[in-house]
Amino acid sequence: MRCPDCGAPNRRTARFCDQCGGLIRIVARSRSSASRPGDRRIVSALFADIVDYSRLVSELDAEEVVARVDEAFGSMAAAVERYGGAVEKFIGDAVFAVFGANRAHDDDPLRAALCALAMVESFAATARERGEEPLRLRVGIATGEVVTTRRSLAGVSDVSVTGETVVTAIRLQELADPGEILMDEATERASRNRLESTVVGERPIRGSSAPVRVHRLRGERLHRLVGSTGIGLLIGRTADRARLREALVETRETGRGRVFLVIGDAGIGKSRLCADLEEEARGIGYRWTWTENLSYTMGEYYGFARSFAQRIADEESTDSGSLARRLLFSPDIDEATIRRFGGAIAALARDARFSGWEAEAALVPTDPAQVRADLADVTERYLRRLVEEFGPRVLVVDDLHWIDDSSVPLLERLVRTVVDLPCVVLVTSRPETRPAWVGLDHVAVIELEGLDGPGTERLAATVAGADLSDDATAILHERTRGNPLFVGETIRALREDGELVLRGGRLHLRDGVRTGAVPVSLRALLGARIDGLPADARDTLQIASVIGMTFDAGLVARLAGRTDVSDDVGVLAAAAVIVPIDGSGGTWRFGHPLIHDVAYAGTLAARRRTLHARLADELERSEPPPTTAVLAAHRAAAGDTERALPLLEAAADRAMASGATAEAVGYWRTALGLLGDDPRSEVIRARIESAGLLDPDRVSVEIAPAGPGERAPVR
């Protein structure tokens, strides 16, 4: 049987294509069917198979089997929906789900893993209720690049997800034992600070280009391991840390609370800065409570409030409901307040699974405004009694931008309450979220920027285990802008890909390597940021990425076949994805090199080639004309061998005449990549060898296009 997507031959019984991972199905393709351009994106694919299906068929009536399987599918689909994924297909006794295909999140691998755990627990809970043996699952999860395409066939719309990641998820499911969840390395790495797992080892995967390092998922960690990436040293935050330490000492002495809002982009080190204070805070007499907000719980009522209470209860080895009764209902409280507070907490228990209060549902007031007011009062009394009984405390509220709406007024009451309590509150948030209470006198803001050059160098050396060369450090800092997460992930990717070579006691980038590929984890993180933009703005961003790091809005409009893209540019600027270069609003620059790279990588290869060809045509007509190197870059990226080859040779000759041997070799390599087995490649290979390149077989098909007036760096 041939795959309807790629045409590769497969076994007659195959469910998915061994080559591309597409679903093997018979499709009546209408001549009028149309495909809308899709995206290349990072997703987490989950494949779960019900192990006991054959046993059910042999033991039960067919109608009962259908009922049991439908119920199982319903609980599995509910878990997928809860964690923001999409069920792509039900196939026989299996479910295929994808996280990040319709809308990317920066924690899709974690969502997929938690979904798998929820599926297993759902089966177990149903069996406990009925006193029967639970159904078991085999689950495989893989994270990586796929192509998503929305097809319309005979009036039916369908999203197709194609790529090696899908194949890997299927094969991992096949390797799993009943009741086992297996993950690939990319999934485990992206979510290791929230999951417990063990290494199974390297396994050959049929249909995969290389063996896969497999991990067995054991469960979810109770609390996130902040700074668990192996970096034990806080770098470049000396002044900020000293400021926070001074506040800890001052509050301990005066009993007057302080609140700090720590703002910065994802990966900049907000949580790491806060976590670094814990040992010192405990040393001077503070209790320490860390509460995080999670993207996939934003829709849960009072999710932050419940998590906050549970964290404190965990510290006292009790449950949240019992501790709340102990703190709130002391002998000095009157009956009316007991009833009022009891009703408010019963509402929280009903809406947010606050342990120990579910039976009090009859106390819930009928007026929602009264519930909100009473819960705010509960928050204040709870906090005051907590400090009275247990002493000074540091409260960390991580990822404020993901707090649920119901908890927002409760957090505000907490912030206002600590002004006369020995409490320090550390709140981390991304720049787009600035709460109303930020203007209070006892609240201060710390805005974190990327590390400077020396800081980037120290962090890179810590992650890599050796000092980097000056050139490698400069390229790394330019590429990551000193974002600690970006630095760490980029270094790891470079080492795994063999792009860092130890020479003379320092790590150097391999000859000709300028940047390396964007790590999967960063593509997922930045891809989620891009995915949050309106569709037209995303399209404009992709077109701009083909032009380069800098671009002219008018040129983008011409490539898009539109008269004006100013509205889209405004949206991108408001999201800080691009920044203006001049005051005219005509020339722009990507806000971060990795945002440019992710936008470019997310564009379908066929569309990229078309846009590069159009861009080259535009540049040839422009005044002043582009450099030969820039025009060669776009002709090569368009795959136009015959027009690119003379340009590449001319660019190489000019570079050699200027003594720029490395650049010349880069142009020749690109020419080799375009020529393939063409006999003309031997002439170019001889020129590369004569230039003294040690690795003449290392070729690159694409040149990273530069912006107007920039040199085109060679990948």
Image (cartoon, rainbow, N blue to C red):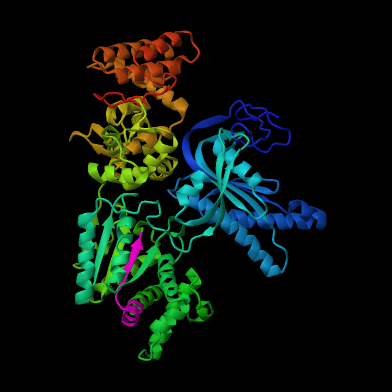
Q: Position of residue 653 (x, y in %)?
A: 30, 11
Height in image: 552 above or below 189? above
Residue 552 seen in the current view: no
Q: Position of residue 532 (x, y in %)?
A: 39, 45
Of residues 607 and 527, the one drawn nearer to the viewer in this rendering: 527
Left or right: where does residue 38 sit relative to residue 261? right
Q: Quadrant of residue 227?
A: bottom left
Q: Quadrant of the N terminus?
A: top right
Left or right: where does residue 582 sit relative to residue 142? left
The residue that appears at 30% across and 26% down in the rendered structure is: 706
The residue that appears at 29% across and 54% down in the rendered structure is: 234
Residue 605 seen in the current view: yes
Q: Quadrant of the C terminus?
A: top left
Task: Determine if the magenta segment contains residue 337.
Answer: no
Q: Quadrant of residue 289?
A: bottom left
Height in image: 679 above or below 522? above
Residue closest to the far front: 504
Left or right: where does residue 240 sit relative to residue 403? left
Task: Determine if the magenta segment contains residue 397.
Answer: yes
Of residues 666 and 151, the one drawn nearer to the viewer in this rendering: 666
- How many numbered markers are drawn? 0
Of residues 288 and 641, the one drawn nearer to the viewer in this rendering: 288
Left or right: where does residue 461 sit relative to residue 190? left
Provide the residue span drawn in magenta: 382-398
Height in image: 368 above or below 65? below
Height in image: 338 above or below 540? below
The residue that appears at 57% across and 34% down in the rendered structure is: 152
Q: Position of residue 479 (x, y in %)?
A: 31, 37
Q: Position of residue 153 (x, y in %)?
A: 60, 33
